[in-house]
Amino acid sequence: MAELESPKLMKNLINFLSSLLQRVAESNDINCQFQTQKISVFHGLTRPTISIQSYLERILKYANCSPSCYVIAYVYLDRFAQRQPSLPINSFNVHRLLITSVLVAAKFMDDMYYNNAYYAKVGGISTTEMNFLEVDFLFGLGFHLNVTPTTFQTYCTYLQREMLLLQPPLSAPAAADSSLSLAKSLKLQYLCFNEDETSHQKHQLAV
């Protein structure tokens, strides 16, 4: 996804992911009143004061990982959600899941990456906690870290489409030079891909 090298597109990606996760967290905060949700190492005692978007922007600024890591992190969060339905993303765990998913993605994708102590500082947690989060996240994924080119491209296509649809409408001349021509409300859904990676179905987001 070479297009992600564009600072503008990366900004749009961060805005989209933070918007999506914010909606998911708020939705699951409400659902927890009616459904029992498991407490995990990702669960904080209180809601972090920093917003999801500010947190993601901080990770983007300091992690210096490749742009593709953010797509891979999204893939991992999607897989984690599917494998751990009793651990939905909410306001108490979304920040820790974010920093952990980016850390794991960077280690898997990049030739060079910062160590856990550095990511702990970026995420505002201790190195010991970062280590525990990484291990728990890996087990939560069943160590299913490989992302095939087909899966990567499918997620990229989905993310790019949703990012474009979030943009305000452009005039006809501008639309001719840009695909950012539609505006659409973001739905509380995520893509669930089968292992054969040849088909997918949409589920209501219950991460």
Image (tube, rainbow, N blue to C red):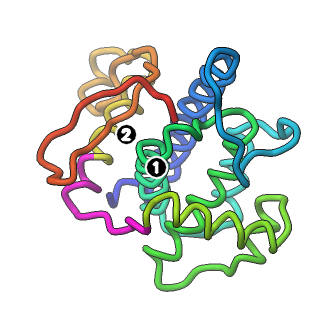
Dot 1 crowding, Cα within 10 Å, few <14, some 14–19, many 20+: many
Direction from residue 133 to residue 142 in the image, left or right: left
Q: Quadrant of residue 149?
A: bottom left
In this figure, what is the number of numbered marks? 2
Secondary structure at numbered mark 2: helix
User: Which residue corresponds to mark 1?
Assistant: 74
Residue 203 screen position, x and y as percent:
35, 27
Secondary structure at numbered mark 1: helix
Q: Say if mark 1 contacts mark 2, CB within 8 Å.
A: yes
CA distance for labels 1 and 2:
10 Å
The N terminus: image quadrant: bottom left
Of badges 1 and 2, nearer the viewer stands: 1
Dot 2 crowding, Cα within 10 Å, few <14, some 14–19, many 20+: some
The numbered mark at residue 140 is: none
Taking the spot 71% from the left edge, 43% from the top edge, the residue there is 39
Taking the spot 24% from the left edge, 64% from the top edge, the residue there is 148
Direction from residue 101 to residue 154 in the image, left or right: left
Taking the spot 14% from the left edge, 53% from the top edge, the residue there is 196
Region rendered in magenta? 143-154
Residue 183 screen position, x and y as percent:
40, 16
User: Which residue corresponds to mark 2?
Assistant: 159
Q: Amino acid under label 2?
A: Leu
Instruction: Give the camera-side residue of 65 and 128.
Output: 128
Instruction: Give the camera-side residue of 86 and 107.
Output: 86
